[in-house]
Image (tube, rainbow, N blue to C red):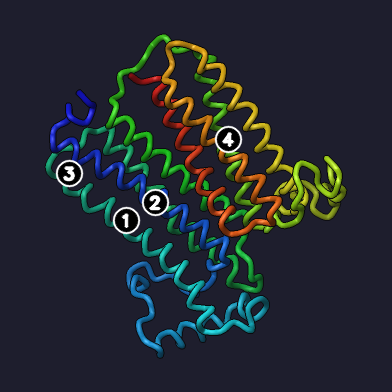
């Protein structure tokens, strides 16, 4: 008998809701990546949480929105020859990103109110969802704070703010995924798990998260286009220009050469560490091999996509696959860790 078949219809409703929230957050992360990669993030000049739900629906409203965009630094400095049709293309990516985020809010709040007043949520779930709600509010504010960085003088979004925006999205995704897994499988702990193995998973989770965040700096500064060879950069392992005096400690965040070097070798180190841990655990008899093999598969795909994205100068297709798979890699390590400590 499957785990789902053991649950009541009321429990299945909550499970479907939690899984839906997790999937929608994943979709938002993917759309956010496309918004950045298509350089669409600065196409909407204002933030109207309620009224901004409706897009332009007439020729006159499109012209009005386009005229507002023409006042932005991005149009004046980067896209001064842009046509209305070209503007509509970037506008739609940003609008879809915001619209799906608003839909997530409704899918989160309305069932939460219903389940709460029906007394179908235990205190642990309510507490966890309140944490998600707080992060969601912070995320909305951070998203607009990020966009504003490119609306005054500088026509580029701050890579620092972009990384914070992505980081919070990943936190929300991870919490919802963990909650969904716990609701599906239950939380009966396995007490004979080695602390060393648990710590190895903690390190793996940290390395994967750091690699993803370093990737956001690659995207935010277009550092992926600075060197399109692998493994060497300009026929050197350690490239000239890695440290520039004028940047100081900011080299790792603002120097495109340093960002490129750090991301690729952090990714390689993460690949070696995580794959070695997984291969070691697969040889054991008392670990969930499916979850371990899943991590290994997604990890291998990720490193291949990363190399292809580099050597082909960051084409949109490889870049978005690489970014999407990074989130799936994070999901796979969370899934494997959950199967490690809970029955």
Front residue of 223/160: it is: 223
Compared with residue 138, is residue 36 higher up or lower down, i.e. above or below? below
Mark 2 residue crowding within 10 angstroms, few (<14) / some (14–19) / many (20+): some
Residue named by callout 2: 136
Residue 115 falls in image quadrant: top left
State how far apart marks 2 and 4 are (Cα).
32 Å
Question: Can you give x and y, in whole percent of width and height, for residue 141 in the image?
Answer: 45, 59
Front residue of 285/226: it is: 285
State how far apart marks 4 and 3 are (Cα).
40 Å
> What mark, if any, has residue 25 been given in the picture?
none
- Sequence-wise first label, 2 or 1: 1
Q: Label 1: state its secondary structure.
A: helix
Residue named by callout 1: 105
- Sequence-wise first label, 3 or 1: 1
Residue 341 visible: yes
Question: Can you give x and y, in whole percent of width and height, for residue 143 in the image?
Answer: 48, 59
Asked if the residue under mark 4 is in contact with the one under mark 1, i.e. CB atoms within 8 Å, the reply is: no
- Sequence-wise first label, 4 or 3: 3
Asked if the residue under mark 1 is in contact with the one under mark 2, i.e. CB atoms within 8 Å, the reply is: yes
| Image position of 241 (left or right of 326) | right
Front residue of 300/191: it is: 300
State how far apart marks 2 and 1 are (Cα).
8 Å
Residue 255 visible: no
Front residue of 10/110: it is: 10
> Quadrant where the C terminus lies?
top left
State how far apart marks 3 and 1 are (Cα).
16 Å
Compared with residue 47, is residue 178 higher up or lower down, i.e. above or below? above
- Sequence-wise first label, 1 or 4: 1
> Quadrant where the N terminus lies?
top left
Q: Which residue is drawn at 57% across and 27% down?
A: 203
Q: Which residue is drawn at 43% across and 70% down?
A: 47
């Amino acid at each position: 008998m499957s785990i789902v078949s053991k649950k009541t219809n009321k429990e299945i409703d909550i499970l479907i809701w939690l899984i839906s929230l997790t999937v929608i957050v994943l979709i938002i992360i993917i759309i956010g990546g496309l918004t950045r990669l298509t350089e669409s993030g600065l196409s909407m000049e204002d933030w109207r949480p309620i009224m901004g739900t409706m897009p332009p629906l007439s020729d006159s409203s499109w012209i009005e929105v386009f005229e507002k965009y023409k006042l932005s630094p991005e149009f004046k400095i980067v896209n001064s020859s842009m046509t209305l049709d070209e503007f509509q293309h970037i506008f739609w990516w940003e609008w879809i990103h915001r619209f799906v985020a608003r839909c997530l809010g409704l899918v989160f709040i309305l069932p939460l109110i219903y389940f709460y007043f029906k007394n179908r949520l235990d205190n642990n779930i309510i507490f966890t969802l309140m944490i998600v709600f707080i992060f969601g509010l912070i995320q909305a504010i951070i998203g607009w704070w990020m966009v504003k960085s490119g609306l005054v003088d500088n026509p580029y979004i701050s890579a620092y703010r972009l990384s914070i925006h992505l980081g919070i999205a990943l936190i929300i995704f991870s919490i919802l995924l963990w909650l969904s897994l716990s609701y599906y499988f239950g939380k009966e702990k396995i007490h004979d798990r080695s602390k060393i193995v648990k710590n190895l998973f903690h390190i793996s989770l940290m390395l994967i998260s750091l690699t993803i965040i370093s990737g956001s700096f690659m995207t935010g500064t277009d550092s992926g286009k600075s060197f399109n060879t692998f493994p060497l950069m300009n026929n050197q392992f350690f490239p000239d220009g890695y440290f520039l005096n004028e940047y100081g400690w900011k080299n790792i965040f603002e120097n495109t050469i340093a960002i490129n070097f750090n991301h690729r070798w952090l990714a390689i180190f993460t690949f070696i560490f995580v794959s070695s841990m997984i291969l070691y655990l697969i040889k054991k008899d008392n670990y969930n091999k499916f979850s371990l093999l899943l991590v290994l598969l997604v990890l291998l795909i990720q490193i291949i996509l990363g190399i292809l994205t580099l050597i082909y100068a960051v084409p949109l297709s490889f870049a978005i696959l690489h970014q999407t798979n990074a989130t799936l890699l994070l999901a796979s390590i969370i899934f494997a860790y959950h199967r490690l400590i809970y029955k």
